[in-house]
Structures are given as structure tokens and as C-alpha cells.
Amino acid sequence: MLRTLSLLLCLFLLVAPVSPADAAPTDAAVGDEVVVAAYVLDRAPADGEQADLGGVAVGFEPRPGGGAVSEPVVLGDAEAARASHAAPPGPRLVTYSSTVTAADLAASAAADAWPQPRILPRSAWGANESIVRYPSRIGEVTGAMVHHTATGNTYTAEQVPAVLRSIQAFHVNERGWNDIAYNVLIDRFGRAWEGRSGGVHRAVVGSDDTDVTNQRLTNISLLGNHEEVAPTAATMETLAQVFAWKLLRHGVDPHGRTWGSGGREGGRVDLPAIHGHRDERPTLCPGRYVYSQMDALRTRVATIMAGTSFPLFSDVPNGTAFGTEIRWLADEGISTGWTDGTYRPLEPVARDAMAAFMHRAVEKLGRPAP
């Protein structure tokens, strides 16, 4: 009987269909080119205007200095050439490309920007720091917005760093933003990547940092077009883990409310604490297959927050010797760590730092201190 069941299981695995999002990726080769393409209009788009880009219907958003730019799409070299020749009257094609490097193949082995949940640092995807226009601004976190990049769903694990570099260039040069838009990006393999610079543990303002909504939110984007394809289970679980850590760190109720743009540019004022981009203004983002899971996402985030203790400092992961004592010192305001999210030091302490520590400790004990 067991042998028969085993045989049936094997046959099922052989014939069961595999969705494109879950299919095993083909390894990318060093030197492969990843192209992110978009259309640019030198005029304001008509209401609901779309264009076909590589077989994907893309909408348009305002562009700094006038005109509009479409959502970006990841294309191969040949597809980009065909898209250039097939561009409809009016829009012109812009492309940003990045080459897969040897370092990209080992990106998953990079040191963490944060240990739990694991977030890979900007250095792992080779962020171009030279095009960042100014240091990231710090706001507050009263909620979390879900996006999708709308760029495509068939990228390989090895191509992800190159895709992120191309998106960063597109956001800076075509959208006019300071850096890549999102605080964290999550790929279809369930890996989280640090997006905008400034520290994943801080309330870094993403996207257009002059926008009042972005100044109150953390923005996380799923790498793919989820109007067309459902996100993987690994992607959604990582999204829930990162949201749980972030909202717990900033004291936000996942079932609570936040507020949006005050009605500017069609934006809504009242929003769920965890919401999709389309809740705030007219857009398909984060795609119907993600948006349909928003209630389940909030519930999962709340469950994680209720049962998980995340590290308070990036260099003091759970299980570290004296980790409990370090958290107590931080909670009491005696030794609260550094702005880069580390506790430190792991080496002998300078005399002035030790004096400051002892001074705060004495004050906490109720003793007068000079």
C-alpha cells in the first residue's frame, strides 16, 4: 500500500503543472544584460491612457518637469529593440540596463543589513551610491504601504541585483526621486533587500520624499507584476515578517488606521495601517493578486507580532550572550545603541563612552549625578 502511494505521489509530481512564478529559474550568466524599459510622454496623459510595452499594458504617472512616464518593465535586449520599433505615436522608449556580475551570483551570501527578519544590504545588490542626490530624510512610521514594481515575473535569482540597479537608475533619472523608491524590496524567492539608504531600522522616507503620505509610512515593494501573476507563498511570508518587525519596532497596530495625503492628487485621507498603494490613489498597484490578500496579510502580521521577539539591534541577534541584559539596558534608556542600528562596542570602550554610560545608570538608580 505504501509503495503504491509513493508511486502515485511521484507521478503527481511529474505531471503537476508549475506556475511561472514558482518555476525553477535558469541560472543567469555573468555578462547577461538586464534591461528596464519605460515609455515617456512629453505631454500630460489622457485619463486612463495606456500603452503596450513588451506585451504588458502600462499606465502613466507625472514626470518631474512635465509630461509623464510609464511603469517600468524588464525586457531582454531583443525585446527592448522590438519595443523601440513598435512604440505607438507619441511615447518614446527609455531604457536602463545593468550587467549581471560575479558578485551578483553570490549576493545571497552577503552580510545582513538586519538579521531577523533577514534583509540583505544595499551593497549586496550593488546600489549606485554616486547617483543618490542627498541623504535620505527621516519621517515617522504610522503604517505600511504595499507596492509591486510591475517589472515582470520571470527573472532569475541571479538577475535580481541587476534588476534592482536598473530600477534605481530609472527612479532617479525618470521619476526624479532621490534614490530607489522603496524601503525594502522582496523578490519572488522570498528574499528581502534593503532599498532606500538610511537604515532599514529607521523611519526613512521613501518614494517622493516631499509627499505627506510617504513621510508617515514604510514602503515595501514586491518585485514583479502582480496584476498578472500571484505572488509566491515565500514572498508573502517574508512581507509579513518584515511588516511585523517594522510595525512592532514603531508601535503600530496592524489592524489600526493611518492617514494619507489629505486629498491631494486624488489621495485618500483615512487608510488602514497596512494598505495597498491603490487604497491611497488611483493605480493598479500592488496588483490584484496581492490586493486580494490584504486582510490575510494583516492577520498574519498581527500573529507574528504577538509571538515573535525580534532583535532590537542588528549586531545582537536572538541568542547572543547577554542579549536579554542588553535589551533591558536599552529599554531603561541606560545604553540605547547607535543610530546605525547597532549596539556596539565589541571592543574595549573609550573612557568618555564609559563615563556617559555610568552617568545614565546612576541617574536611573535615583542617585543625584552632576
Image: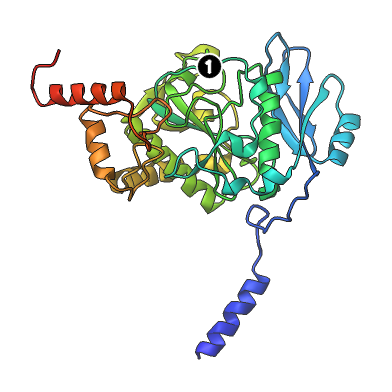
Which quadrant, please, contains the C terminus? top left
| Residue sitting nearer the eye, 35 or 262 | 35
Say how the picture is coloured. rainbow
Residue 93 placement: quadrant: top right
Q: Residue at x 81, y 43 (%)?
A: 31
Residue 364 placement: quadrant: top left
| Residue sitting nearer the eye, 74 or 113 | 113
Residue 204 at x, y percent in the picture: 47, 23
Q: Residue at x 42, y 31 (%)?
A: 201
Residue at the top extreme, as displayed: 65
Query: Is 349 above or below relative to 193?
Result: above
| Residue sitting nearer the eye, 257 or 170 | 170
Residue 258 at x, y percent in the picture: 38, 24
In the picture, measured across the screen, residue 49 lies left or right of residue 250, that is: right
In the picture, measured across the screen, residue 20 lies left or right of residue 193, that is: right
Q: Residue at x 62, y 72 (%)?
A: 13
- Let me know if residue 230 appears in the view: no
Query: Is 2 above or below relative to 301?
Result: below
- Let me know if residue 138 appears in the view: yes
In the picture, measured across the screen, residue 157 lies left or right of residue 147, that is: right
Q: Mark 1 sits on what residue?
A: 209
SS class, disc 1: loop
The amino acid pointed to by label 1 is Asp
Residue 331 at x, y percent in the picture: 23, 32
Residue at the bottom extreme, as displayed: 1
Query: Is 336 above or below relative to 299?
Result: above
Query: Is 57 above or below relative to 353?
Result: below
Residue 3 at x, y percent in the picture: 54, 89
